[in-house]
Image: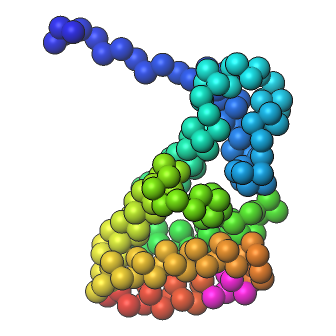
Amino acid sequence: MAADAPIPAARRPSAAKIRLLEVADRLFYAEGVNTVGIDRIIAEAAVTKATFYKQYGSKDALILEYVAGRDRQVRESMTELAESSPSAAATLQALVETIVADTNRPDFRGCPFINAAAEFSDPAHPVRRAIGAHRDWFTSFLEDLLAESGHPTPGAAADELYLLRDGAMAGGYAGDTVAANSALLRAARRIFAEAR
């Protein structure tokens, strides 16, 4: 390709591919990735089996795209939160408030990443690797915010905050939402108070 040749635009996914992912996203989160069969996704997306295999090739590829889509949603929402907050400390507080709000949604089923990871025992599986990459990114995001807010040990605090988030998500779904959120808020306040 010549140096001055235009770069081809990225192809927009087909309407069928988008529908398949939207249906899979809803069903995988609500019922679990291994519980929901391909035939049900195909039927609810109103596409043919041939279309499904042309677009994704396998259920594992669709699951991987589901995880990647959830990762993009989190990254975009966290980036928007950081850009709209007046400080790193305000972003961290808003993040905790977002977790509390999420656990109180009527359709809340816990963390989609933890739920999907629980269904893939092999840590080398592409879905587990994608989940690991998401968690690494999120921990780094938290660490950067904590460092910017003046926390003396931002890496350790990021690990603690992520663990608190996981606990609130699991406890908020499987147990007492009020207790899980109260514990999250108390522990997060202690972490934030350690910053200068």
**Frontmost residue, 190 versus 64:** 64
Total numbered circles: 0
- Indicate the quadrant where residue 87 lies: bottom left
x, y (%) of residue 142?
Answer: 41, 69
Judge whether 173 appears above or below 119 on screen: below
- Principal SS element in the magenta part? helix
In magenta stretch: residue 94: no
Residue 48: x, y in percent? Answer: 76, 20
Q: Quadrant of residue 44?
A: top right
The one of 58 and 165 positioned closer to us in this rendering? 58
Residue drawn at x 54%, y 89% as measured from the top left: 187
Observer-nearest residue: 113 or 192?
A: 113
Question: Which span of residues is magenta-colored?
Answer: 179-183
Q: Is residue 169 visible?
A: yes
Q: Residue at x 77, y 30 (%)?
A: 42
Question: What residue sits 55% from the left and 80% below the top?
Answer: 164
- Is residue 73 visible in the rendered image? The answer is no
Residue 181: where, in percent of width, then height? 67, 81
Left or right of 192 in this view: 154: left
Is 85 situated above or below 22? below
Please, which colouring scheme is shown? Answer: rainbow
Tell which of 159 and 78 is nearer to you.
159
